[in-house]
Image (cartoon, grey):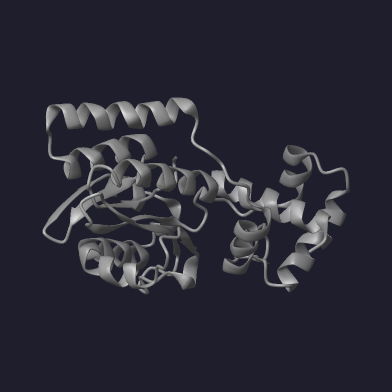
């Protein structure tokens, strides 16, 4: 893909992630400082749409990234983004505090992750599940239609039954990003998921996953997942995080 088209796609992903509103050429021109005219930007957007990276939900609307567009962004444009030192220290301090208080880590870790991300956090294993923040996920604009709302809610009711199927798709301890239709949880094709397996010092295997709208903040969420994985791997807590994309 030409550099100019990459910049257009990247700007549309960023803008749509922040606003959930289809992105038009005027917004790109004014907000992202493109030197070309709105007409040229529209031509570039039309080319990206023709190639399958964008789509136009309504005739008079701007464009939205497709699954292919997000995949290209994640693999070719996105850069790794580490948690800030403040975020790392907060996570470390809270985990140490919980250990010192000998609290139930599955429940308190869910609270911690939910407070840091504005997300639904589900923690534990199939025998011990705790969750916080479901309203944040379901309040996302993508899920306001009743059919979609009910579909997401139903999946969350049985999320513990999906943990094993998620693990089967992972190899070699790698962190994977599933976008839209790639999602191993087939009933939520309008969501993306970042997943990573881990193994505690005691040998217990688990999974961490961030699930949210396809416009989630992929780099930030991946960095959160990788860092929490390090902390969890030393504490023996299984965590599944359902993101509402505010982190």
Q: Position of residue 190 (x, y in %)?
A: 45, 65
Relative to 51, residue 176 above or below: above
Locate the C terminus and report the quarter of the image it occupies.
top left
Quarter of image, res 100: top left
Whether residue 244 is visible here, answered yes or no, is: yes
Q: Identify the image quadrant of residue 117.
A: top left
Q: Residue at x 25, y 29 (%)?
A: 96
x, y (%) of residue 25?
A: 76, 51
Residue at 37% from the left image edge and 74% from the top image edge:
186
Give the residue displayed 35% in from the left and 70% down from the top: 185
Residue 72: x and y in percent read: 65, 63
Quarter placement of the N terminus? bottom right
Tell me residue 130's x, y (percent). 17, 49
Which residue does the image show at 67% across and 52% down from the upper left? 12
Question: In this view of the protein, can residue 65 be seen by the observer?
Answer: no
Left or right, residue 47 beside residue 194: right
Q: Nearer the viewer, residue 152 or 195?
A: 195
């Amino acid at each position: 893909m030409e550099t100019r088209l990459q910049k257009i796609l990247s700007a549309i992903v960023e803008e749509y992630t922040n606003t959930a509103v289809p992105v038009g050429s005027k917004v790109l021109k004014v907000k992202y400082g493109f030197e070309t005219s709105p007409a040229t930007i529209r031509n570039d957007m039309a080319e990206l749409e023709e190639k399958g990276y964008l789509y136009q939900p309504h005739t008079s609307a701007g464009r939205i990234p497709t699954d292919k567009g997000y995949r290209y962004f994640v693999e070719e444009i996105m850069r790794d983004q580490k948690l800030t030192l403040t975020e790392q220290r907060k996570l470390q301090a809270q985990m140490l505090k919980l250990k010192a208080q000998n609290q139930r880590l599955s429940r308190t870790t869910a609270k911690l992750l939910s407070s840091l991300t504005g997300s639904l956090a589900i923690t534990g294993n199939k025998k011990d599940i705790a969750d916080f923040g479901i309203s944040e996920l379901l309040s996302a604009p993508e899920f306001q239609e009743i059919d979609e709302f009910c579909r997401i809610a139903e999946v969350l009711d049985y999320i513990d039954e999906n943990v094993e199927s998620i693990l089967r798709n992972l190899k070699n301890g790698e962190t994977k990003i599933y976008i839209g239709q790639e999602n191993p949880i087939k009933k939520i094709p309008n969501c993306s998921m970042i997943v990573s397996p881990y193994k505690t010092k005691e040998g217990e295997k688990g999974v961490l996953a961030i699930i949210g709208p396809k416009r989630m903040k992929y780099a930030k969420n991946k960095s959160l997942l990788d860092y929490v994985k390090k902390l969890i791997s030393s504490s023996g807590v299984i965590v599944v995080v359902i993101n509402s994309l505010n982190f």
